[in-house]
Image: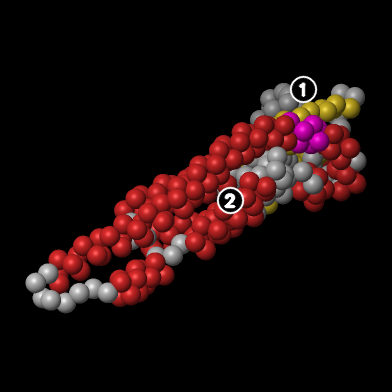
Amino acid sequence: MAISMTGCGDGSASEGQSTCRVELRVVNNRFFKLALRSRDAFATLEPRIEAAIRGRVRRGAVQMTLDVTGPAVPAGRRFDHGQLAAYLDDLEDFCATHRIPAPQTIDGILGLPGILVETPPSSDAVQQLWPLVNRSLEAALDGLERMRRAEGNALANDMQSGCGAITQSIAAIRQRVPAVLAEHRSRLTDRVTKLLEGSGATLSAADLTREVALIADRSDIAEELVRLESHVAQFSRLLEEESPGRSLDFLSQELAREANTIASKSVDVAIAHMAVDLKTHIERLREQIQNIE
């Protein structure tokens, strides 16, 4: 069954005293797009993360939050011993000059600029975290897939109902077509009879038949109805696939094109109204397709 493009999922995994947590959110997008929010150190894992997500998500804008806590997190800071020594020497000189006792601890100095320096961890240290990250990512993807399948099932059922409504509209239009020609022939006969009344001229059956044939040719919608039925049948079959979004989008455009052609050819008010209903059902399908992967 078709899968929804939107959804969310989260997962976590632990190893010793270290824990990794992943949150995933996917929203509509024509293409695949990944936005990773994590510490800068984990940027080197992004290609492996993207490959894992692409294996389960074909389309959509994916927002991923990655957080690792515990001793497994690569150290990203260090003391600048030279800067700390310089601060201590300045402090000692100041205390000696002003004859005040030097502080017995350095707690107050540690917050001064330049003491703690950010240092990127080695790539090898980050790559060693991949098994932990991968387990939590797979758990998040499992939750995401369950949600997307449940929503996709509901969307597919709703669109199957829409296909049924379109099929009913097609059948109603096809049933109406013969009556349209008969009514047009009758109205044309009445109008011409009134126009020729008292003139002595008469309308031959051949002339009337030729005129009705011209109208029938200009308003013929048989091909459009056949194509509509074919597109609806294909649409219904595609809803049984997992990721038919692009194909469904193309078919919905073709359905709309055929419906517009029927509306433009129509010489009957009833068929014109049916065509409006038909286009309404198709437009509703097009809106729902935007949520299908």
Q: Nearer the viewer, residue 11 or 272?
A: 272
Label 1: element kind: loop
Residue tagged 2: 232
The answer to whether any part of residue 145 appears in the image is yes
Q: Magenta stretch mostly in which secondary structure?
A: helix
The answer to whether any part of residue 83 appears in the image is no
Q: Which mark is residue 104?
A: 1
Q: Of discs 1 and 2, which sits in the foreground?
A: 2
Residue at the image position 31 percent from the left and 63 percent from the top: 185
Q: How is the image coloured?
A: secondary structure
The residue furthest left is 198
Amino acid type for the residue under numbered disc 1: Gln
The relative height of residue 7 versus residue 60 in the rendered view (above or below) is above
Q: Assess disc 1: are there few (<14), some (14-19) or many (≥20) residues with their C-alpha within 10 Å of its C-alpha.
A: few
User: Residue 146's spot in the image, x, y percent?
Assistant: 72, 32
What residue span does the magenta drawing correspond to?
Answer: 136-144
Q: Relative to 144, is 229 on the left or the right?
A: left
Number of callouts in the render?
2
Using the rendered view, name the quadrant where residue 113 is placed. top right
Q: Earlier in the sequence, mark 1 or mark 2?
A: 1
Is residue 288 rendered magenta in the image? no
Q: Relative to 14, is 9 on the left or the right?
A: left
User: Residue 140's spot in the image, x, y percent?
Assistant: 75, 33
User: Residue 133's spot in the image, x, y percent?
Assistant: 83, 37
Is residue 137 rendered magenta in the image? yes
Residue at the image position 85 percent from the left and 34 percent from the top: 135
Q: Nearer the viewer, residue 135 or 14?
A: 135
Amino acid type for the residue under numbered disc 2: Val
